[in-house]
C-alpha cells in the first residue's frame, strides 16, 4: 500500500545536476562492451545447452527439470533485454532495437516495443498512481483507495493478495505474452508487423519443440513449470524495488522522485547476478543508461550525496 512521500530539505540549485556531474567525472556512465559481450555469450550458451539437453533427454519426465532451468534462463534473457532497452549496451537506437527484438521477441517471446514503451512510462513517473502503468490497479492493487467498491474475483484477490502474491507471479510469464499480443492489436504500435512476425517465430519453434519431443501431458507440464519458474524469478527481480514505497504527487524534483520511490536490496555478487543489477534500484532509476557493472561503484557516491541533501535512502538490511 502507498505512503506519503517523505522529502528532505531542498538545497539551492539542481541537486541532481551536481550528482550527475560527480558520476560522469567518475566515468561510471561509460559503456562496458566487454562485460555485455561476455554476459550475452553466457546467457545464450546456457540457452543453447539447455535446448540440447532437452533434445537429448527426449520424451522423459526428467525434462521437467529442464523446464525449471529454462525458466531461469528466460529471466536472465529478459534482464539482458532490459539493459538493451535502456541503451546500456549500445548508445544508439537502431542496434538497441535489433538486439532487443532478438532477445525479447525471438528468445523470450514478448514484445520488445510494447515493454519498452511501458517501462519508459514507469521510469518517468515511478509509483505515480495515474502515470506509472506498473501501479495502476488491475488484478492486484497498490493503494487502499483502489480496493474500494471491488467485488467478485478481484475483491477476493485484493483481500488475500499478500498470500496470493507468489502464486500469481507464476502467471507473470503468460501475462507478458498476452499483454504483448494485445499491444500488437493497437493501431499506434510501431513496427507491428515485425514484432508480430518475430513473436510468431518464437511461438512456432517453442510449440513444435514441445509437441515433437514430449508427450502431450509432458508438454503441458513442461509449459506450466517453465512459465511458473520464469514468472516468479522475473517478478522477484522487480517486486522488491518499489512495492510498499511512497507514491509521489508529482511536485518532487527528479532526484527525490527517483530516490524516494525506490528501494535497494542488499547482497553480494550472487545477488548482483541473480537480480541483474536491479538490486541497485535507486542508482538504476537515477541513471537508467548506466551499465549494470557500474551500479555498485555508483552506490556509495549516491548514498553519501543523498545523506548530505537530506533525502531518505532506502536499503533494508
Image (spheres, grey):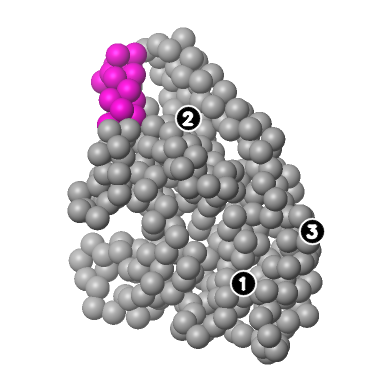
Front label number (1 vs 3): 3
Cα–Cα span, label 1 and label 2: 34 Å
Q: Which residues are magenta?
A: 200-216
Q: Classify 310 as above or below 242.
A: below
Query: Is disc 1 placed on a helix, strand or loop?
Result: helix
Disc 2: which residue: 70
Is any part of residue 162 visible from this angle? no
191 in the magenta segment: no
Q: Is residue 84 left or right of residue 216?
A: right
Labelled pair 1, 3 in contact (Cβ < 8 Å) = no
Decide which of tag 1 and tag 3 comes sooner along the chain.
3
Q: Position of residue 56 (x, y in %)?
A: 46, 10
Q: Is residue 198 above or below residue 269?
A: above
Q: Look at mark 3 in the image and give the residue it sits on.
A: 26
Q: To which quarter of the image does residue 22 belong?
A: bottom right
Q: Main secondary structure of the magenta part?
A: helix
Kindly identify the residue that appears in the image at 46 percent across and 71 percent down. 125
Q: Which residue is mark 1?
A: 259
Q: Nearer the viewer, residue 61 or 275?
A: 275
Is residue 306 placed above or below 270 in the rendered structure? below
Which residue is found at the position 48% from the left and 68% from the top?
124
Q: Residue at x 38, y 37 (%)?
A: 105
Amino acid at each position: 500500500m502507498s505512503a506519503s512521500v517523505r522529502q528532505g530539505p531542498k538545497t539551492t540549485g539542481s541537486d541532481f545536476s551536481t550528482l550527475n556531474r560527480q558520476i560522469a567525472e567518475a566515468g561510471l556512465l561509460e559503456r562496458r562492451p566487454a562485460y555485455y559481450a561476455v554476459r550475452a555469450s553466457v546467457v545464450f550458451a546456457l540457452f543453447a545447452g539447455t535446448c540440447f539437453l532437452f533434445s537429448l533427454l527426449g520424451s522423459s519426465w526428467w525434462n521437467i527439470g529442464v523446464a525449471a532451468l529454462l525458466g531461469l534462463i528466460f529471466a536472465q534473457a529478459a534482464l539482458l533485454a532490459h539493459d538493451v532497452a535502456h541503451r546500456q549496451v549500445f548508445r544508439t537506437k537502431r542496434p538497441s532495437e535489433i538486439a532487443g527484438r532478438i532477445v525479447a521477441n525471438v528468445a523470450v517471446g514478448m514484445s520488445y516495443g510494447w515493454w519498452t514503451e511501458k517501462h519508459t512510462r514507469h521510469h518517468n513517473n515511478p509509483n505515480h498512481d495515474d502515470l506509472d502503468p506498473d501501479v495502476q490497479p488491475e488484478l492486484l492493487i497498490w493503494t487502499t483507495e483502489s480496493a474500494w467498491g471491488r467485488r467478485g474475483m478481484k475483491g477476493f484477490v485484493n483481500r488475500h493478495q499478500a498470500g496470493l502474491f507468489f502464486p500469481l507471479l507464476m502467471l507473470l510469464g503468460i501475462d507478458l505474452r498476452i499483454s504483448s499480443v494485445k499491444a500488437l492489436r493497437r493501431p499506434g504500435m510501431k513496427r507491428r508487423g515485425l514484432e508480430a512476425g518475430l513473436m510468431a517465430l518464437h511461438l512456432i519453434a517453442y510449440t513444435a519443440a514441445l509437441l515433437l519431443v514430449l508427450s502431450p501431458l509432458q508438454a503441458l507440464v513442461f509449459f506450466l513449470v517453465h512459465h511458473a519458474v520464469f514468472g516468479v524469478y522475473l517478478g522477484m527481480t522487480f517486486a522488491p524495488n518499489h512495492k510498499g514505497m511512497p507514491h509521489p504527487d508529482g511536485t518532487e524534483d527528479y532526484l527525490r522522485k527517483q530516490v524516494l520511490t525506490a528501494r535497494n536490496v542488499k547482497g553480494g555478487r550472487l545477488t548482483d547476478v541473480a537480480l541483474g543489477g536491479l538490486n541497485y534500484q535507486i542508482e538504476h532509476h537515477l541513471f537508467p543508461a548506466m551499465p549494470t557493472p557500474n551500479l555498485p561503484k555508483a552506490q556509495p557516491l549516491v548514498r553519501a550525496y543523498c545523506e548530505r541533501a537530506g533525502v531518505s535512502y532506502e536499503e533494508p538490511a
